[in-house]
Image (spheres, rainbow, N blue to C red):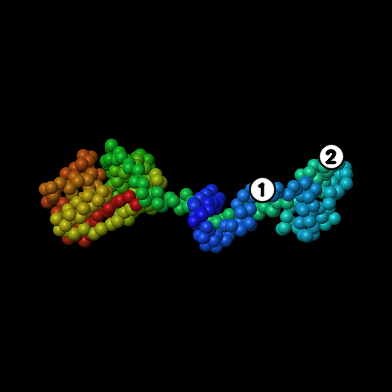
Amino acid sequence: MASLSLQLQRPGQLFQRPAPAMQVLPAVRQMPSLLSPQALVSQFRQPALPSPAPVSTPLDRFQRISGMLSQRGIPATVPQAQTSFQAPTQSVPSQVFSTSPQLFSAPQAGQQALINNPPIPRARPLHSPAEPVQSSLAPLISQRPQARPADLAPALSATRPAPTRKPLKDDYTYQFGEIGKNGGTRKEAQANCGPASSAMILKAYGIQPPSMHALRSLVGAPTGSRSGPYALDSQQVGKAVVRTAAKQGLDLDFSVKRLSTNVDRTLADMRKGLERGDKLILLSSGLRSLSQGHYMVIKEIRSDGSVVMNDSGRRDGKDFVYSKNRLAQALSKRVNTYRRENQLISFREA
């Protein structure tokens, strides 16, 4: 049987095989689209070149822009040559577009430049160059509370330790040391154990105290040589210290506590105050002569119960040591004989 050589060409592929003549027709029927004239022609046709973009002349661009402006009621005609600026007859809506001022004032030499390169309308900015940019977060930022130095002061003072003051080297004051000096009188000196104790507490905080006469005047205590009592009470002694320290920039507080005649309890109270860092003044009967009342500065409680004091009533009263037994006698004498209470004045930094 005669055979035919059937060649079928596809893009990029060639088929060639011998086939019997009776088999050609079924093969052709199975691929009618490949053998159609349109398919064969389309396979050998060159790809079409992209159509060139339409050429836009400056005049076309100007006419297109003019049409856009005229739809919004904006005149866009190029005026004739003129020597001075003429305002347009119709105001430009600022909320739509803002066009270049060159459309309304152009000299003769610039008309051709406008035609060749017409200005492109641009959207009006949300703010003028002279105005600050207002962000959408501006209301939230303005409502946020700003920290001020005055608001930060309490937080800084709470975290920053207070400056330490060194005690003065000479921390003792003799109550009779100002007779005839700084306005002091003998009448004042006989009851100056209170002002002298206040002065020694100020020295313990590193503050040079004023005269005992000035401390009396500061709290309204009697001065001069008039008759009558000159002793200060516990509140006046405490206020003399606090007010003087405040003038030097140091804030102090004080408290007055009633003491027991039990010497062990009294020693425990004084020991706790010293451990807290308080400065202490004891008001009891004088430990030297068991007088009715006397102020003394407590400096140390020893393990045997003896007390180290600054006693302003003695010339050798600096760091004078009184025994536990003598303290017990003074506590009992003031309550049982003089019917007065023993007191402990405690000072601390505010």
- In which quarter of the view is residue 175 placed? top left
> At 74% across and 47% down in the image, what residue appears?
55
> At 53% across and 51% down in the image, what residue appears?
5
On the image, the x and y values in percent for residue 120 come to 73, 49
User: Which residue matches tag 2?
Assistant: 109
Q: Please tell me which residue lies in front, 339 or 157.
A: 157
Within-10-Å neighbours for mark 2: few <14, some 14–19, many 20+: few
> At 41% across and 52% down in the image, what residue appears?
154
Q: Earlier in the sequence, mark 2 or mark 1?
A: 1
User: Which residue matches tag 1?
Assistant: 49
Report the residue that reaches farthest toward the top.
Answer: 169
272 on left or right of 44: left
On the image, the x and y values in percent for residue 18 come to 49, 52
Can residue 22 be seen in this snapshot? yes
68 on left or right of 274: right
Can residue 134 be seen in this snapshot? no
119 on left or right of 26: right
Mark identifier at residue 95:
none
On the image, the x and y values in percent for residue 150 come to 47, 51
Disc 2 marks which amino acid? Answer: Ala
Disc 1 marks which amino acid? Answer: Leu
> At 69% across and 53% down in the image, what residue appears?
123
